Image: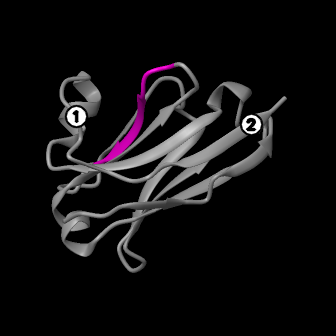
Amino acid sequence: QTHLVESGGGLVQSGGSLRLSCAVPEFTLQNADIGWYRQAPGKDREGISCISSRDGSTYYAESVKGRFTISRDTAKGTVELEMNSLKPEDTGVYYCAADRQGMYIITTGLGWFDHWGQGTQVTVSS
């Protein structure tokens, strides 16, 4: 079974930065796209970023483009999400997720990732 564990959430002021990390099993990292979703209170989950297992290509939602960077660290077995220039509207629970068709899912909004982490809270104050 695939088990994903997020870490790095916390409280930060507007304009600040946080770096989230998702620990990914080796097999999953090699074979599945890893995405990041977030969910604000009362809102649906929003797919904000994804990295392809095949070629390392990346996707960013317009809401985070230019501010967030997704990367993989194969030595550590993690996928990172560096978040810069944070805004209060970035507040929410952030989840990493894995799926072999992750890039398709997140770019089309169709379907649901197979595997999910437990989530980590990110709070951005004004």
The answer to which of marks 1 and 2 sits earlier in the sequence is 1
Between the residue at mark 1 and the residue at mark 2, the CA separation in whole angstroms equals: 27 Å
**Residue kind at label 1, given as amino acid type:** Trp
Q: Secondary structure at mark 2?
A: strand
Q: Residues within 10 Å of mark 2 (few under 14, many from 20)?
A: many
Give the magenta range.
43-51
Q: Is residue 16 above or below residue 2?
A: above
Task: Judge by depth and name the residue closer to the eye, 39 or 66.
Answer: 39
Q: Residues within 10 Å of mark 1 (few under 14, many from 20)?
A: some
What is the quadrant of the N terminus in the image? Answer: bottom left
Q: Residue at x 36, y 61 (%)?
A: 4
Q: Secondary structure at mark 1?
A: loop
Q: Is residue 15 left or right of residue 96?
A: right
Location of residue 48 by image quarter: top left
Residue 125, labelled with which disc?
none
Q: Residue at x 61, y 56 (%)?
A: 19
Judging by the rendered image, the residue that carries numbered circle 2 is: 124
Q: Is residue 22 magenta?
A: no
**Residue kind at label 2, given as amino acid type:** Val
Task: Judge by depth and name the residue closer to the eye, 41 or 94.
Answer: 41
Judging by the rendered image, the residue that carries numbered circle 1 is: 112
Location of residue 73 by image quarter: bottom left
